[in-house]
Amino acid sequence: MTPLASTVVFISAMAFIIELIIIYLVTSMIVEKNKSTISLMKIFGYRKKEVSSLILNIRRLSSWLGSSLGYRSVLH
């Protein structure tokens, strides 16, 4: 049973790393696509947090909660 548990932990860790890479790539693509819009928003006086919430529209709490619940169910 121990080798199976260590394999599951290893696969979960790799899935987490792949998830972080995908989130980074998607965020980079969104920022690159909206570069001119972001520049205009900064010129108009929007703050960094406002620009982030308008352009990226990422629900950080829900994404972290979903990820942690998914990995917790795999590990237990």
Image (cartoon, helix red, strand yellow):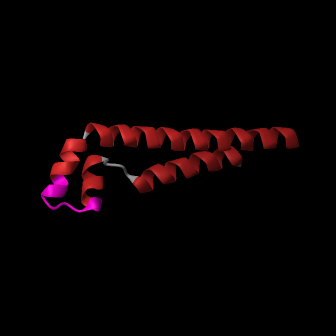
Residue 37 appears left or right of 25: left
Residue 30 visible? The answer is yes
Q: Where is residue 13 shown, x and y percent of the image? A: 66, 44
Please report the residue visible at 78 percent of the width from the left and 38 percent of the height from the top.
7
Count of residue discs: 0
Residue 1 visible? The answer is no
Q: Where is residue 37 shown, x and y percent of the image? A: 19, 45
Please report the residue visible at 26 percent of the width from the left and 47 percent of the height from the top.
55
Residue 2 appears left or right of 53: right
Task: Kindly give the residue lying farthest to the left in the view shown.
Answer: 44
Q: Which residues are magenta?
A: 41-49
Q: Where is residue 6 shown, x and y percent of the image? A: 80, 43
Front residue of 45 and 4: 45
Instruction: Name the image quarter holding residue 50.
Output: bottom left
> Vertically, is 54 above or below 29?
below
Please report the residue visible at 44 percent of the width from the left and 38 percent of the height from the top.
25
Q: Where is residue 56 shown, x and y percent of the image? A: 31, 47
> Vertically, is 44 above or below 30?
below
Q: Quadrant of the N terminus?
A: top right
Residue 8 appears left or right of 42: right
Residue 31 appears left or right of 68: left
Residue 1 drawn in magenta: no
Please report the residue visible at 15 percent of the width from the left and 50 percent of the height from the top.
40
